Amino acid sequence: MDTFLTNSPEIAAEFIRNGGLVAFPTETVYGLGARVFDEAAVAKIFEAKQRPADNPLIAHVADLEQISELTSEITESATKFIDKFFPGPLTLVLEKSPRVPSLATAGLDTIGVRMPESAAAREFLNACQSPVVAPSANLSGRPSPTTWQAVYEDLNGRIDCILQGDPADIGVESTVVDCTGEIPIILREGAISLEELQTVVPATARAPVRDPKLARSPGLKYRHYSPRAKVTVVETEGQVETTENAAFIGLRLPQKEPRLVKLCDDAEEYAHELFEFLRECDRRGIDTVYCQAVDEQGIGAALMDRLRRAAQG
Ligand code: TXA
Ligand code: MG
C-alpha cells in the first residue's frame, strides 16, 4: 500500500500514537520515527530501512522532561550541552533508563537523545506525546534524505506516513557526543563542530580510534551515504578527469567540466547540497561523482566524514 502523505503534524502524530512509522522533517535530515516504548513499532523501523539490528537509534524529545523518561543519569557535561545547544543538531549519549526497550539501543545500556529545533519537528513531536526513536529516513546505506521526496523514493509502501515539510536547513546529521564519561567524546561528526562544543566543555575530544571496525558508534562501521555511482574525493578541482558520465560538487569550478556540476559558495552550502546531489546523480544515471575535499574545520569535519564514507561505497 502507498504511504500516506500529509502536511499536518497532528495527523502524522496519530500514526505514531497508533504504533505506526512516520517520516518527519528535522533541521538536519528527515527521520523515520516510531514510539520509543512500543517495541513492535521499533522493530518495524529496522525492517523498513533494512537496518542492521546492532545499530542503535536516536530518541527525539519535545521537551526536557522527556529526557528524564529515557535516561537514568544526566551528567554534568550533558547538562551544559543541553543548556547551550538544545533544541538543535546535537545528540547526547547517556545511560539509558530500564524502561527503554533494548531493541531501540541495539542492546547497549546507553541511549542517544536529541531535541530537534525545526518548527515542524517540534510540532510533530509535541503531538506524539512520547519520545520518538528515529534514524535517518533512508534505506540503509543510501544518502540521508533532505527532502520528503527523497524519503518517498526510498520508503514509499514500506512506512505508514510521510510528514511533508520543507527541505532540511542543514543537510548533514547531528553531532553524536558520548557524555557518560569524564570527558565528552565525539562519536560522529555533525552539524555542531568540536570547536563549538569546546566553548562549553573545553575537554571535549574526538574519539581516538578512527578505525571503523573499532568505532564506538556502531553505525560508523557500515556502508553509508552511498549512491549507485562511484564517489571519488579529489583534493583539488584540477584532479577531475572528465568522463562523459561524471559529475562534480565542490567549491571551485573544475577546468574540465563534467556533465553535471554543483558549485557551492562555502562548506555550509556544500553540506546542505551533498546528499541531494548524490541522489540526483543516481536519477540521471551518472557513473562517477567527483567531490572536492574541504578543510576539516567547523562543518567541514562532518562533510569530510560523509565524503570519505560515501567514497568507501
Ligand atoms: O540528525 C540526526 O541525528 C538524524 C535525525 C533524524 O535526527 N538521525 C540520524 O540517525 O542520523 P541515524 O540512525 O542515521 O544515525 C545515528 C547514529 C549512528 O551512527 C548510531 O550508531 C549512533 O548515532 N548512535 C545512536 N545511539 C547510540 C548509542 N547509544 N551509542 C553510540 N552511538 C549511538
Ligand atoms: Mg543514517
Image (cartoon, grey):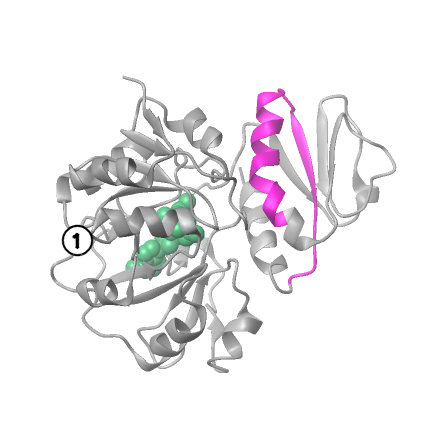
Q: Is residue 235 left or right of residue 118?
A: right
Closer-to-camera residue (232/59): 59
Residue 163 visible in the shown view = yes
Residue 234 falls in image quadrant = top right
Image position of 172 with respect to 206: above or below:
above
Q: Is residue 96 left or right of residue 114?
A: left
Image coords of residue 161 (percent x, y): 30, 30
Magenta segment includes 290: yes
- Residue at the far left: name it: 99
How many residues crowd mark 1 within 10 Å: few (<14), some (14–19), many (20+)?
some
Image coords of residue 128 (percent x, y): 23, 47
Identify the residue shown where x is 44% and y is 74%: 84
Identify the residue shown where x is 27% and y is 35%: 11
Task: Indicate if the residue with disc 1 has its beta carbon within 8 Å of ligand 1.
Answer: no
Image coords of residue 259 (percent x, y): 76, 25
> What is the magenta range?
271-296
Indicate the quadrant containing the N terminus: top left, top right, bottom left or bottom right. Answer: top left
Identify the residue shown where x is 62% and y is 20%: 285
Residue 108 falls in image quadrant = bottom left
Q: Which residue is mark 1?
A: 102
Q: How many marks?
A: 1
Q: Is residue 27 left or right of residue 231?
A: left
Residue 55 visible in the shown view = no
Image coords of residue 111 (percent x, y): 27, 60
- Residue at the far top: name it: 1
Q: Amino acid at mark 1?
A: Ser
